Image (cartoon, rainbow, N blue to C red):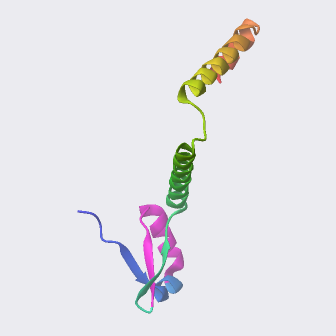
Amino acid sequence: MPNAPKIIPISDLRQNASDVLKGVSSSGEPVFITQRGRAAAVIVSMEAYEHSQHELDILRLLARGEKEIEAGIGYDLHDVLKEGERLLEGANTRKSSLHPRLAASSLKQ
């Protein structure tokens, strides 16, 4: 069973802001702040915020891609894969033409 959300009034946040932030950071769980008995804000850890922003960016890219597909804009998958293979072959050719020591060190990276 999932944990019940942590909900605190804004007055508690004012009095114990440092403790609330430590709790959010250590648990990774959001804290819901109420004001006059109504939801007013949510505090999340920086890690959770960045993760949600990353997911949102991906969703935006997917939505844009779907719109491009509907509009007939974009590239054929076969052409993209072919270009990727060409670029990889070019990179491998450049590495193999390097001095053996340089080629070995570039493979470690």
Quarter placement of the N terminus: bottom left
Image x and y of residue 20, in percent: 48, 74
Write the residue at 37% across / 74% down: 6
Name the quadrant containing residue 82: top right
User: In the rendered image of this protein, does residue 95 appear above or below residue 19?
Assistant: above
Q: Which residues are magenta?
A: 16-35
Task: From the top left corner, tell me how far across and down residue 64 is, in percent.
Answer: 57, 50
Q: Main secondary structure of the magenta part?
A: helix
Query: Against 32, is 98 above or below?
Result: above
| Magenta span includes 63 | no
Across and down, in percent, residue 19 comes to: 49, 74
List the single residue furthest toward the bottom.
36
Which one is nearer the viewer's eye here, 57 or 52? 57
Q: Position of residue 63 (x, y in %)?
A: 52, 51
Quadrant where the C terminus is found in the figure: top right
Q: Is residue 12 above or below residue 77?
A: below
In reply to whether residue 33 is colored magenta, the answer given is: yes
Residue 71's place in the image compared with 36, above or below, is above
